[in-house]
Amino acid sequence: MAHETPGHDNPDHAHEHPTWKQYRWVALILTVITALEVWAYYVPKLVASPFFVPLLLIMSAVKFIIVVMFYMHLKYDHRLFRALFTGPLAIAMATLIGLLFLLARTGAEMRG
Amino acid sequence: MAQTAAETHAPTQHHYTTTGLDNRKVAIWMFIGSECMLFASLISTYLIYKGKSLVGPLPHEAWTNPQTGQTFPAILDIPVTSVSTFVLLMSSFSMVMALAAIEARVRPRPSNPGFWWKVENSSKLWLLMTCLMGATFLGFQAYEFTSFVHEGLTIRKNLFGSSFFTLTGFHGAHVTAGVIWLGTLLAIDMKRGLQPKDAVWVDIAALYWHFVDVVWIAIFTLVYLIQ
């Protein structure tokens, strides 16, 4: 049973929020993914494999998205809020990736 | 006249914008957007300096000082940080439960509410749990920082120390602000009881708290787990 956010007739509160049961499921999923991340850290073969970093990044991204969508209600909220979050996040990610590529390249060039 | 002014600023008043959205929520989302860029810059700095420290202690591998022969073990304590990460994740769960409990107060109370109904609808309990878990996370961070200093890693020791303490210190400061914020909400709830009309204030605090949580999700993976 999804309960609406009552007491607010303004548009940003007129959406459904997840139910308590869904919140518990989300908490369980977050716990399981965190446990998997820590487990992966202690498996030497996995750490040495080229899949280790992408695997951790994917698991982290899944946790990030789940919290943002369900706990921060972005899945249910007004699209302006989505734009206010994803716009700066995209700029931040692009800056981060750009800096890493730029400085990794500069470092490689400096080394020879 | 004074009465009119008081009515104008009554707590039930909504703060609409021309978009039809509550301007307090627009403001917190804009703030969170700017915080994304702040933490991206801090994480970028950490990653750029990663592996470039000339002296130890180092995060994932032991380091021996060639002059003194002293060996410093890998400094990150993954089991302890895993527990603190779990605590922070669960604090997000208790935060959404607090908000849901306040929003649910417009529904009629059952004539004979059971124990679990009372637990699920107790905003005080969930806010208190969120505060306690936030404080526990800060306790773990204080323990970690103290042990690092005892093991020879300070903010001035090497590039890892500088970027690590800056990044996690900024995050810790945000958690501290969040705990204080939630503490004030808990105090208001204790004093007069938070009502559905106050839900937007709790929602704003919750958004901030969840943002602090998602930042830690990124830090835990990028700083602690990826070697």
Image (spheres, rainbow, N blue to C red):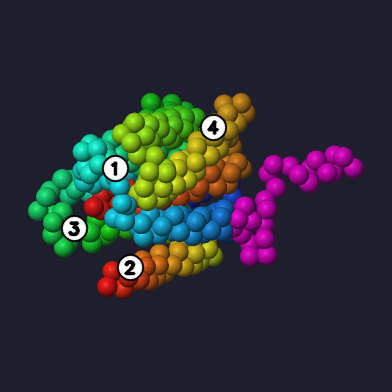
Foreground: disc 2 or disc 4 = 2
Q: Are marks 2 and 4 on the same chain?
A: no
Please give the label number shown on residue A107. Answer: 2
Asked if disc 2 and disc 4 are in contact, CB closer than 8 Å, the reply is no
Chain of the residue that carries numbered disc 3 in the rendered image: A
Q: Residues within 10 Å of mark 3 (few under 14, many from 20)?
A: many
Q: Is residue A71 left or right of residue A44?
A: right
Chain of the residue that carries numbered disc 2 in the rendered image: A
The amino acid type found where label 4 is placed reads Gly
Q: CA distance from mark 3 to mark 1?
A: 24 Å
Q: CA distance from mark 4 to mark 3?
A: 40 Å
Above or below A10: residue B1: above
- Residue located beneath label 3 in the image: A52
Q: CA distance from mark 2 to mark 1?
A: 22 Å
Q: Is residue A47 magenta?
A: no
User: Can the viewer see residue B154?
Assistant: yes
The amino acid type found where label 2 is placed reads Gly
